[in-house]
Amino acid sequence: MKTTPLRIDRLVAGGVIPGYFCTSGCRHCLYRSGPWRGKGFLEAGPAEELFRRARSLGCRSLHIGGGEPLLQPAGVEALLAAARRAGVGIDYLETNAAWFRDEPSAVELFGRLRRGGLRAVLVSISPFHNEFIPFRKTQGAIAAAERAGLSVFPWVADFIPELEALGTDRPHGLAEFAARFGEDYLARIPGRCWIHPGGRALDTFRPLLGRKRLAHVLEESPPSCGRELGDTRHFHLDLHGNYIPGLCAGLAIAAADLGAPLPPERYPLITTLAASGIRGLFAFAQREAGFAPAHDRWWNRCDLCEAIRRFLFEQGWDRSRELAPEGFYRSRSPACEPPSPSS
């Protein structure tokens, strides 16, 4: 049966990942960012090309994510300038506030970014971030952004009372949260805020929530992943020129290939997923590389999909450029060591 190639020719809403480096190694990070990732940052010229590509496909504004973009503030200023030249707006910038030193310097930084066109900041708030970042830094960044005239979106504000209760002057490990708020604290988090089953969230939550057997995952999965792969309501473009389809971190489409049918010979994994879902990818990996699951305890089909893709990467399967960026698959550590209480 002839397979219809996936085609992505209209972008709705998304963001740019200028770099994957981050001083934290949060246990829920979809893109497996962390201190072990390279410090490369999207330069102005390639950024302008990506902005223009997104605009040509209907997307008039994007956000800036990461990694932690404000570890390279001059790079962010260059991104804002590139967006202006391309006629693309910046919806907001994501930050975890790890860089914060004091309010005056943060106000000055946010003021420069505001003059460069930034209007809003999403400040990350969670127990995962608090393993590495004292909440006083988060509070300071929020106050500085507001003083600089930026809109602030605290994500997720629901955790603020718990972070304040544990103390704001040092990081707190997840064991401290469990001791204070209940042993099932971690397992309850996906019911309180959005956690996508991908990246390091799989390592974190599979032991707690991954109770499905392989046969069950395959049986309950839809016949195609085309809807997810073709969903352009939350896409990302990264510094390597990759388009990350939907929330499928670790899968990559060259931004230059958007707007036309994706050649199956260049995108066999994405083509297979779009045509026949996880069952098709499972059969493909068995046939092409002898894939056999290492365990039988899965969170869901996204968990199985990443395991299959990781197996192919580790086996050196190289028929396409879809398994990218490379750092995603080389960064399996569930988290780096949290800083000392004196940090």
Image (spheres, rainbow, N blue to C red):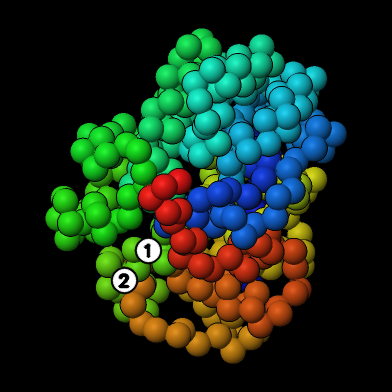
Which residue position is annotated with label 1?
204
Kindly identify the residue that appears in the image at 76 percent across and 27 percent down. Answer: 78
Q: Quadrant of residue 204?
A: bottom left
Q: Residue pushed farthest front?
A: 342
Q: Position of residue 236 (x, y in %)?
A: 61, 42
> Separation of disc 2 and disc 1 at Cα?
7 Å
Indicate the secondary structure of the residue bearing disc 1: helix
- Quadrant of residue 81 within the rendered picture: top right
Q: Is residue 199 left or right of residue 50?
A: left
Is 48 rendered above or below residue 301?
Answer: above
**Relative to 195, 19 lies left or right:** right
Residue 170 quadrant: top left
Classed neighbour count for the residue bearing mark 2: other residues with Cα under 10 Å, few (<14), some (14–19), many (≥20): few
Give the amino acid at mark 2: Pro
Amino acid type of disc 1? Answer: Thr
Front one among 275 and 201: 201
Q: Answer whether labels 2 and 1 touch (C-beta < 8 Å).
A: yes
Q: Position of residue 113 (x, y in %)?
A: 64, 19
Q: Which residue is mark 2?
A: 207
Q: Is residue 288 left or right of residue 157?
A: right
In the image shown, does 282 or 92 lie closer to the viewer? 92
Residue 154 pos. (x, y %): 39, 29
Tell me if I can see residue 326 in this picture: yes
The quarter of the image holding the N terminus is bottom right
Judge whether residue 52 can be spotted in this image: no
Residue for point 39% across, 28% down:
139
Q: Is residue 250 above or below residue 55?
A: below
Question: Helix, strand, or loop for circle 2?
Answer: helix
The relative height of residue 286 versus residue 208 in the rendered view (above or below) is below
> On screen, 298 above or below 8?
below
